[in-house]
Image: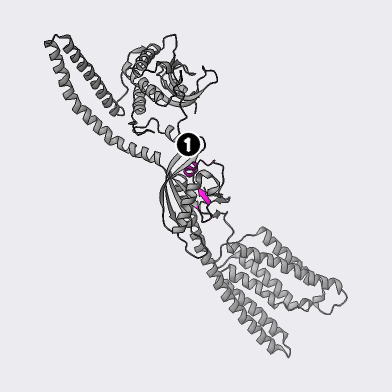
Amino acid sequence: MAGNTALASWFGLREMAAEDSAFVRLWRGFMTARVMIALVLLLVLGGTWLLLPAVPTSAAAGYWPPLLCLLYLVATVAVRVLGGPRPPGQTFDAQWASTIGVDLAAFSVLHYLQAGGINYVPLFALPLLLASVLSSLLLALGTAAAITLLLLVDAWQVGNIDGTPRLVQAGLAGTGFFIVALLANQLATRLAREEKRSRESQHLARVQIEVNELVIETLADGVLVVDENGIVHAANPAARRLLGAWPDRSTPFVLASDQAWQPLAVLSRQTFMTRAAQTAELDIAQSGEGSRRVHVRTRLTAAHDVLAESLCVMFLEDLREMEARLRTEKLAAMGRMSAAVAHEIRNPLAAIMQANALLEEDISEPGQRQLTLMVRQNAQRLAQIVDDVLNISRVQHEGNAPTPALLDLSASVRQVCTDWSQQTACAQRLHLDLDVPPRQVAFEPDHLRRVLVNLLDNALRYASQQPGAIRVLTDLSPAGLPRLRVWSDGAPLDPGVQRHLFEPFFSSESRSSGLGLYICRELCERHGALIGYQRAPWRAVTGAAEGNEFFVLFHARGGAAAHAAAFATIPA
């Protein structure tokens, strides 16, 4: 977030490093002015001493004034380079007193000597302003009083015929110094108060901006800030993802610069024309990913003055993700309902099976026994489905399931694929590449059948009509784990679909319930297996055709370490 460097703000501002306060800048200005005055005095009086060495009409013609100016210059440079500002408003500060005292002493000696025939009274304004602006009112008035006394004493010591006018002049000058000290101190106090209030307001505004930026950056919904010319001034990561804009594209950029964003540009112009909020569902084309349906809401910011322009804030939501969230929200209710329904089905189902068994004992006609056999088989199948639903609903509340018996992976997969190809009449499109050595895995046969049939059904839905469009492979993963792979030559899945593949009630088609892959994942997790998806080539085919691949990594006897190694081999 904010640091000592300038950072770009969401709201078109620049957060700069903390600048010096007005007090520090004034201190530097006064110290620089003291150095310049000392340098000018040294040049003037030193030049006078060098050019007029043979006119000793007064003490001013000696070397004392230039030496005093040299010492004063050294003192002012030392304070400017080595000194630092102290907080204002203190009643007494040794630093301010010594600085002001040095000025008063130097100017008083020069004024008393009348060096170079120069009037040094205006120079007393420098220590007076220094005390008034950068210190307390008491020190400012004390400085004014000291200057007035010096002027009155000097006027009284003259004692000639013009003594009375000089006393009056010194008194008037002293009065002016008191007034200047009072006004300058009041102005400085007000400046310090306003600066403190301004800094507090800037701090609060900076904190608010940082919080707003953090909230906007982490929003799941996209946010765009567009002006009346269609220029995007800010776009959060979610908006860039929905627009398909490359991450390193810096703002501002023109919204209408991409043909795919034209619907957004039109909606922005409509918002500015009507001066009212707009809502629409737009299709945004993305290269290589088809189009994305987006729900867009626009709002206009209020212009508080004639110089500030209104901005259009656009909120973008992926309709597919919205629907997925709605489906996910139904999961808890559906879980409770499915458990209740399953329990209610069990009782009448048990009665049906018992009645069918009694009926089988009383009949001997082959046709009727065939019917009772069908009733028994379908009742058993229905009971198994009820058990699966109950197991899935309780999976997060149960411990590890008992380890099932080992089965031959390749033989089981071959049997399931053979039955499935006969039922779907697509034997020509299915190709098997199974390990010859038997691979023993701990998995319930019925659950493996259900997982594999679900993956085959998904592959059949999106595969082409070409021979070998669907391929099933069993092998060992790079980590040495038994692996089942179901590959099809279908089109790439949308990234938005990939993120929610194994979520319940999520499907890219309206006729699908969205439970198939979710149940596959739950069944795999119950047996310690991992299921995933990747876009991969089928290397056994010449040309390495790209396709969609679902894979299952079965449980390793090595436990968690083996699973961690398996995850490390899965492509991103």
Dot 1 falls on a residue whose secondary structure is: strand
In the picture shown, does residue 192 fall above or below 277? below
**Residue topped by disc 1:** 290
Seen as rendered, the residue at the extreme left is: 362
Magenta span of residues: 226-246
Residue 175 belongs to magenta span:
no
In the picture shown, does residue 411 fall above or below 461? above
Relative to 372, is 286 on the left or the right?
right
Relative to 318, is 387 on the left or the right?
left
Relative to 94, is 516 on the left or the right?
left
- Residue 67, image x, y percentages: 78, 68
The residue depicted at 57 percent of the width and 76 percent of the height is 183
* Residue 141 visible in rendering: no
In the picture shown, does residue 439 fall above or below 49? above
- Residue 541, image x, y percentages: 52, 18
Q: How many marks?
A: 1
- Residue 462, image x, y percentages: 42, 26
